[in-house]
Image (tube, helix red, strand yellow):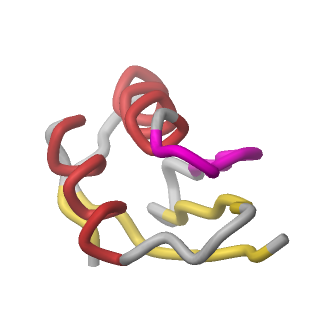
């Protein structure tokens, strides 16, 4: 099991957090998604390496930007 941490910008409320969690959590192999509003931290576990581009696309789909 691998873990990855990124920073998400543009989130302003709990709805934002939930949108990012939902989109990133929908990526095959991703589990235990944690998003912190104050820091913009996105952390998740995965059973395989998830390409950064795939995570960025999911965050973009939610309406935010992966840093």
Give above or below for 14 relative to 52.
above
Measured from the top left, where is residue 62 in percent x and y?
23, 35
| Count of labels in the image | 0
Q: Quadrant of residue 43?
A: bottom right
Where is residue 31 drawn, in percent x and y?
71, 45
Q: Which one is nearer the viewer's eye here, 7 or 12? A: 7
Q: Position of residue 8 (x, y in %)?
A: 35, 63
In this picture, residue 42 sits left or right of residue 3: left
Residue 15, by quadrant, is top left
Instruction: Characterize the magenta stretch by its predominant secondary structure.
Output: strand
Q: Quadrant of residue 55?
A: bottom left
**Residue displayed at 62% across by 50% down:** 30
State which region is magenta.
27-35
List the single residue furthest toward the right. 1
At x 69%, y 61%, the residue is 46
- From this view, report whether residue 3 is shown above or below residue 64: below
At x 26%, y 62%, the residue is 9
On screen, residue 19 versus residue 66, left or right, reads right
Q: Is residue 39 left or right of residue 46?
A: left
Instruction: State the residue in front, 54 or 10.
Output: 54
- Residue at coordinates 30% horizontally, 45% vertically from top-left? 11
- Residue 9 among magenta residues: no
Q: Is residue 65 above or below residue 5?
A: above
């Amino acid at each position: 099991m691998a873990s990855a941490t990124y920073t998400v910008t543009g989130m302003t409320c709990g709805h934002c957090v939930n949108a990012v969690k939902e989109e990133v959590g929908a990526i095959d192999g991703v589990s235990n998604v944690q998003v912190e509003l104050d820091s913009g931290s996105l952390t998740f576990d995965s059973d395989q390496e998830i390409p950064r581009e795939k995570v960025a696309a999911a965050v973009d789909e939610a309406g935010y930007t992966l840093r």
